[in-house]
Image (tube, rainbow, N blue to C red):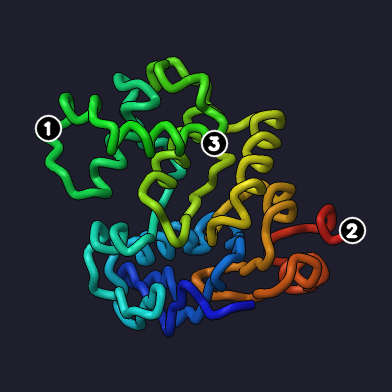
C-alpha cells in the first residue's frame, strides 16, 4: 500500500461514561477502498463524524493528506478534498438532479448561496455537474426532480454531489442502506467503477458489498479495532466471527 491519505492517532471520543472511540489508530491508504464494519453501537458513525469535522475528539489526532486537520472546520476539510455521503440522503427534493449537483459544485467553489437561481445557468457549474451525473449513470435523469427519483437513484445522485467537489477521499456512510438486492448490485457496480479513481472509506452493513469492494477491512467493536487486514484474513478471524460476521461469511 502507498502512503496513507487519512490517518488517526489515538483518536478518542467519550459521551459521559461511554467510550465511543477508544484510542483508535487507523489509516486509509491512497487509492484503496477501506471498509469499516461492526455491530450497531460499535462507533462507526462517531468515527466518521470526527473524520469529517462534525464532532470534535476528546483526544488524539486526525491527519489528512499529510496535514493535521484535528481542529479544522468541516467546510475546510471539504475544500481539502474530504467528501462524505450520508446514511440518510441529503438532497433537495424540489430541485432537479442537475441543480442538486450544481449546488454542490457552487458550494465547493465558495460562491454565495444567495445567487443560486441565476447560477444554475452558468456553465462553470452545470458542466461539472453534468459530468458527475454521467459518472454515476444518471445522465438521462438530469432534468428530473430529485423527489421523482427511485431510492437507489437518489443514492447515486448523492455520490455525484460528492464527486463534483473533486474529492481526494470519499467517506461513504452505508450507501446500500434501504436498498433491495438489485439496487445494491447496481451500487456495487458503480462503486467498483470508481475504485481506480478515488480513495474510499466505506461504512456498510451489507457484507456481500463489503467483500466485493474492499481492499482492506477494519472491524470496530465498542470503539476499538479488533481486527484490520485483507478481506480473507477478516473472514478467517475467530475474533471477528464471534463479534460480528457469523459462520455464514466464515464458510465462504
Whether residue 82 sits left or right of residue 202 in the image: it is left
Residue 136, horizontal then vertical, whole percent: 54, 36
Residue 206, horizontal then vertical, whole percent: 66, 46
Q: Earlier in the sequence, mark 1 or mark 3?
A: 1
The residue lying toward the viewer, choosing from 125 and 192, is 125
Circle 2 sits on which residue?
251
Residue 102, horizontal then vertical, whole percent: 31, 34
Say if 3 sits above or below 113 in the image.
Answer: below
Instruction: Identify the residue shown where x is 38% and y is 17%.
Output: 145
Separation of marks 1 and 3 at Cα, in angstroms: 27 Å
Separation of marks 2 and 1 at Cα, in angstroms: 56 Å
The residue lying toward the viewer, choosing from 89 and 195, is 195
Circle 3 sits on which residue?
136
2 vs 1, front mark: 1
Question: What element does badge 1 sit on?
Answer: helix
Residue 51, horizontal then vertical, whole percent: 38, 66
Instruction: Identify the residue shown where x is 36% and y is 34%.
Output: 127
Residue that extends furthest to the right in the rendered view of this protein: 251
Whether residue 224 sits left or right of residue 57 in the image: it is right
Dividing the picture into quadrants, the one containing residue 21 is bottom left
Q: Earlier in the sequence, mark 2 or mark 1?
A: 1
Circle 1 sits on which residue?
115
Separation of marks 2 and 3 at Cα, in angstroms: 33 Å
Question: What element does badge 2 sit on?
Answer: loop
Q: Which image quarter holds the N terminus?
A: bottom right
Instruction: Identify the residue shown where x is 54% and y is 80%.
Output: 3
Instruction: Identify the residue shown where x is 29% and y is 75%.
Output: 70
Dividing the picture into quadrants, the one containing residue 32 is bottom right
2 vs 3, front mark: 3
Amino acid at each position: 500500500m502507498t502512503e496513507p491519505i487519512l490517518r488517526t492517532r489515538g483518536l478518542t471520543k467519550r459521551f459521559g461514561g461511554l467510550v465511543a472511540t477508544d484510542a483508535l489508530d487507523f489509516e486509509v491508504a491512497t487509492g484503496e477502498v477501506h471498509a469499516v464494519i461492526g455491530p450497531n453501537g460499535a462507533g462507526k458513525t462517531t468515527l466518521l463524524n470526527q473524520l469529517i469535522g462534525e464532532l470534535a475528539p476528546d483526544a488524539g489526532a486526525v491527519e489528512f493528506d499529510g496535514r493535521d486537520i484535528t481542529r479544522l472546520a468541516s467546510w475546510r476539510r471539504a475544500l481539502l478534498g474530504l467528501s462524505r455521503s450520508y446514511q440518510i440522503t441529503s438532497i433537495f427534493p424540489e430541485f432537479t438532479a442537475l441543480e442538486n449537483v450544481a449546488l454542490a459544485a457552487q458550494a465547493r467553489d465558495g460562491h454565495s448561496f444567495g445567487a443560486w437561481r441565476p447560477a444554475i445557468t452558468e456553465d462553470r457549474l452545470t458542466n461539472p455537474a453534468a459530468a458527475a451525473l454521467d459518472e454515476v449513470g444518471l445522465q438521462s435523469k438530469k432534468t428530473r426532480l430529485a423527489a421523482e427519483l427511485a431510492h437507489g437513484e437518489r443514492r447515486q445522485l448523492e455520490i455525484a454531489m460528492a464527486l463534483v467537489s473533486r474529492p481526494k477521499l470519499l467517506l461513504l456512510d452505508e450507501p446500500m442502506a434501504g436498498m433491495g438486492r438489485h439496487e445494491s448490485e447496481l451500487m456495487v457496480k458503480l462503486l467498483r467503477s470508481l475504485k481506480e479513481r478515488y480513495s474510499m472509506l466505506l461504512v456498510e452493513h451489507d457484507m456481500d458489498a463489503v467483500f466485493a469492494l474492499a481492499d482492506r477491512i477494519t472491524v470496530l467493536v465498542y470503539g476499538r479495532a479488533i481486527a484490520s487486514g485483507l478481506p480473507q484474513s477478516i473472514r478467517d478471524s475467530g475474533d471477528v466471527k464471534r463479534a460480528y460476521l457469523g459462520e455464514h461469511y466464515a464458510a465462504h
